[in-house]
Image: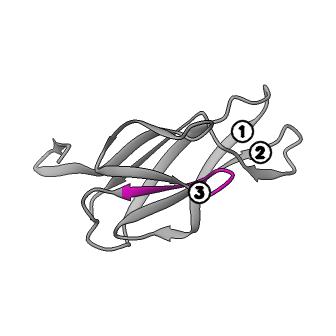
Amino acid sequence: MAGFNVGSDRVEARMWCKFKGDGVHSIYDSYNVSSIGDLGQGGMTLNFTVNMADNNYSWSGATHYGGGQNDASTIEEYDNGTSSTFLKVQNMRCLNDGTQFEGEDSEFTSCIIHGN
């Protein structure tokens, strides 16, 4: 398992993945991800190679959409998307006027799970 020590504690990433979500979906690099699935505009499933202990893990992520100069992107859990076998995420972008969010297939997304 990928990890490092902080004092006497072992800190390990149980899963990490950087993937392409626009065009042909593909994994740039990963640990403990067997495949990715497309859930429609902005939605992706990350399927684990080795299952988590349960679905009560914490995850974080970052995403990028190369749209307009003032666009902002965020990533969120998709439709109660934590499971011991997969994580579902959705990339969202805020349009220039800041009044609307919509699902967006992003150029790249990175996710990580620690613990569990």
Q: Element at badge 2? A: strand
Q: Is residue 95 above or below residue 113?
A: above
Pointers 1 and 2 in contact (C-beta within 8 Å) = yes
**Residue 50: x and y, percent?**
24, 60
The Cα atoms of the two marked residues, 3 and 2, are separated by: 13 Å
Disc 1 or 2, which lies upstream in sequence? 1
What's the magenta region?
A: 40-47
The Cα atoms of the two marked residues, 3 and 1, are separated by: 14 Å
41 with respect to 29 (left or right): right
Tag of residue 76: 3
Q: Element at badge 1? A: strand
Hey, what amino acid is under mark 2? Cys
Q: Which residue occupies the extreme top position in the image?
A: 69
> Which residue matches tag 1?
72
Q: How crowded is mark 1: few (under 14 residues within 10 Å), some or many (20 or more)?
A: some
Taking depth in this image into account, of 33 and 82 the one nearest to the observer is 33
State whether the magenta stretch is mostly helix, strand or loop: strand
Q: How crowded is mark 2: few (under 14 residues within 10 Å), some or many (20 or more)?
A: some
The Cα atoms of the two marked residues, 1 and 2, are separated by: 5 Å
> Which residue matches tag 2?
94
Inspect the magenta stretch and tell me whether residue 109 lies in it. no
Inspect the magenta stretch and tell me whether residue 42 lies in it. yes
Taking depth in this image into account, of 112 and 27 the one nearest to the observer is 27
| Residue ID at (75%, 30%) | 67
**Residue 53: x and y, percent?**
26, 71
| Quarter of the image with the C terminus in it | bottom left
Q: In this view, does 54 lie above or below 30?
A: below
Q: Which residue occupies the extreme front position in the image?
A: 24
